[in-house]
Image: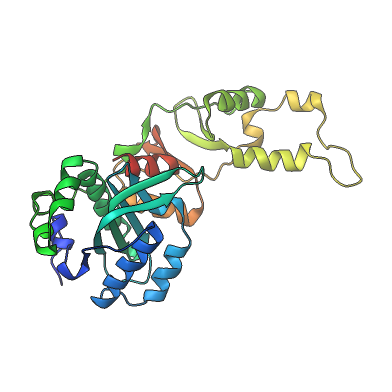
Amino acid sequence: MPTTPQRLADLLVASRIVMPLMAGTVADAAEALCVSLDQSGALSNADLLRERIEEARSEDIVGLADRAFVLHYRTDAVRDLVVAIGVAPHDVVRVLDDDELQRARLVVLVCAPPRQMARHLQVVSALVRVLSTPASVAAALAVATPAQLLALPQFTGKELPAQLTVRELMSERPRTVGPEAPLRSAVLEMLRAGLGGLPVVDESNRVIGMLSERELLRDLLSHYLPRAGGVNALQPPAAARRTVRDIMTRQVLCVAPEQPLAEVASLMLNKDVDRVPVVKDDRLVGFLTRGDIVRKLIGS
C-alpha cells in the first residue's frame, strides 16, 4: 500500500506541472492540466473528467483574488487523488455571472475519487491556505522549472491539515423553537434572522423535530395555494391557532460533534439534507449547514 501523503510536496509530480501554461481562460487551463494528467497516466477516463469540468459548477472553482485558481473535482476519472499545477506567462481569465473578471497566472487542478472526500477536503484546504499568501504565489511564479517549483518551502514544508470534524464548523448555541410555539411566530423569526430552518427541541433541549423551508413549502402547497376548481382547505382562524408541532418533520438526521466532516458532508449530499442538528448525550450542542461547509472550505 502506498504511503499516505503528509505534505503537499508528496502529491506533486514534475510531469504534472505545466510550464508555461498556454491558456487564456480557466476552461483552457483546465483542459491543458487535464492533458498533463492523462499523459502522466493519472487518469483512468479522461473524457469523464472533461465532462465533469464542462459542467462548470461555481462550487468547483476557488478564485483567490489575483493570485490563483484552484479547480477541484470529485470524479471516477481518477483512481487516487492527483494534483496538477500550471504557471501561465499571462493572466488566465474567468468571467463571473455579473460579468466581473477574475485573473490569475497560477492554476491548480485537484481530482479525487468520490470515496476520498476527506482527503479531497484536506488537500484543497491546504492549497487554498498556501495560495492565499501573496509571497507564496510570487515565489511560484518566479521559478523557471518544475523541479524548482517542487522545491519551494511552501510545498515541501506544508503538512496536510488533520481531518476536520463537525465541531470545527458547527454553529454553537443555535436558535431553536419549541413544538408548541405558534407557527406564525416561528416563521417570522426564521425570516427575520435569514434562517433556512430551526431545530425543534423539548424542555430538556433534546431534538424532536425540524422546521425548515421544506416543511413550510409542503404546507403551503397542501393548505394555502388554490387548487383547480376548489377552495383553500385551511381558513385563516384555523391557521392562526397552528403550532410548530403541526408541520415539523419528526425524521431528523442528527450528527455528533466529533464525526469527520467529510463523512457528514457525504451523508448530507446522499440524503439531500441542507442542515443537521449536532447532538451530544442526546442534547443539542450545535447546528451545521451545507453553507457552513462551503464557507469554511473557500474562506480558508
Q: Is residue 222 above or below residue 52?
A: above
Q: Is residue 263 above or below residue 289?
A: below
Residue at position x 66%, y 34% in the image = 246
Check the image and name the residue furthest to the right. Answer: 229
Q: Is residue 189 above or below residue 283?
A: above
Q: Is residue 79 visible?
A: no
- Whole-percent x, y for residue 260 in the image: 30, 49
Q: Is residue 257 visible?
A: yes
Residue at position x 42%, y 45% in the image = 101
Q: Is residue 9 left or right of residue 121?
A: left
Check the image and name the residue furthest to the front. Answer: 90
- Locate residue 49: give its quadrant: bottom left
**Observer-nearest residue: 264 or 293?**
293
Q: Is residue 14 left or right of residue 68?
A: left
Location of the C terminus by quadrant is top left
**Observer-nearest residue: 287 or 26?**
26
- Whole-percent x, y for residue 161 in the image: 19, 47
- Count the labels in the image: 0
